[in-house]
Amino acid sequence: MPRVIFHVDMDAFYASVEQRDNPEYRGLPLIVGGKPDQRGVVCAASYEARKFGVRSALPTRTAARLCPQGIFVRPRMDVYRAESRLIMEILASATPAVERVSVDEAYLDLSAQFPEEAAPDEALEAALPIATGLKERIRSERQLTASIGIGANKFLAKVGSDFRKPDGLTLIREAEKAEFLRPLPIRAIHGVGPVTGKALEDRGLTTIGQLQDTKINLSEIVGSWAGKLRDLAFGRDDRPVDLSEERKSISAETTFLQDTDDRPTLRAALRELADEITETLHKNQIGGHTVQVKVRYSDFTTLTRQIRLEDPLTESSDIYRMACYLLARDELVKRPLRLIGIGLSTLVPPVSIQQLKLPL
């Protein structure tokens, strides 16, 4: 059976919703996040703001310097989540095989809609009207735009959705995939972040084509990921569309108005974060084996530390104690913190647990 995968990615989702709901913002550099004169980060930026170098995760003060005429609005997460549900319903009208990646993107597997004897590229091309129809419905029903990539696997579909943003539609045919990928930058490969990207670029590998052609032993650069990296460079990816709806992790974090290493302040923040996570655990009747603590310093250096437990945690007091333990174990509060967070993963149905005797 030929594989037909869509990657649907909403265009500047948070900012686009704000511009739709507030016509006076349309065509202007809109920045969704904290106030420019206070501690905060950019959650999203309109394409007009991106022209000035504004992007997600930038400090809002930096965004204000880059784009003095930027309009800053507070995020409305409840509105974005509600909008996401409506968009996912539109996507589900094309196929029940939808993997929701985040509030604004999803993979769709339409393979079952095409004859097993169909040639791979024939099936991909036959799917074009379906993608066009989804884009038109999102535009007419939600007054928003989406970019869609079509390929025979998740990697190619994701590359395609990024190729012509905003409002793009890109089909990457199997017969042409290696050639299509050649001119793209090495960092177009999902998983090649700043550290890996720099390591590859330092060896002269700046494009996917150079990665395809290289005789360098990639395991010396990326270790055990070398084989997978080479597969992706040629457009090979066998990951299935994941239809499970189970949560993979729960996290919460807070950014302080002023950097702090004050222990009572940090403990109070950790208790609130643990309470927030526990509320979600109880609502979904789950527990978690792995606790992670996250800290960010004034220079934006970010560290995470984690520990996995034999029995899952379900109570706020236990999560709080584990976070304190990790902070102390790895001496993470050697200087004031800008941000602190807690995460819980390896989620399972809860079982009775013993209280952990750990120092505060």
Image (cartoon, rainbow, N blue to C red):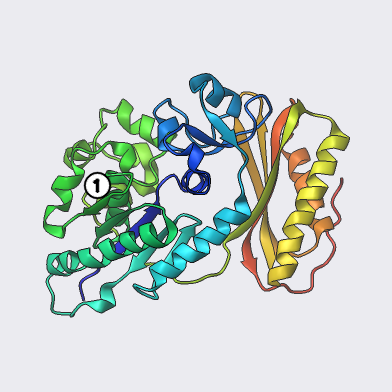
Q: Residues within 10 Å of mark 1 (few under 14, many from 20)?
A: many
Can you say whether 118 is above or below 272 in the image?
A: below
Where residue 50 appears, as percent x and y from the top left, is 42, 32
For disc 1, the marked residue is: 233
Q: Residue at x 37, y 57 (%)?
A: 139
In the rendered view, would you say 89 is above or below 62? below
Residue 12 % position (x, y): 44, 44
Residue 238 makes an appearance in the image = no
Badge 1 marks a residue whose secondary structure is helix
Q: Is residue 152 above or below residue 262?
A: below
Residue 113 placement: quadrant: bottom left
Name the residue rendered at 45%, 65% in the picture.
88
Foreground of the two, 355 or 129: 129
Q: Residue at x 72, y 69 (%)?
A: 283
Q: Is residue 64 visible?
A: yes
Comparing 48 with 115, the one in front is 48
Tell me where residue 27 sits by quadrant. top left
What kind of residue is marked 1? Ala
* Front residue (pair 44, 322): 44
> Horizontal placement of 225 versus 332: left or right?
left
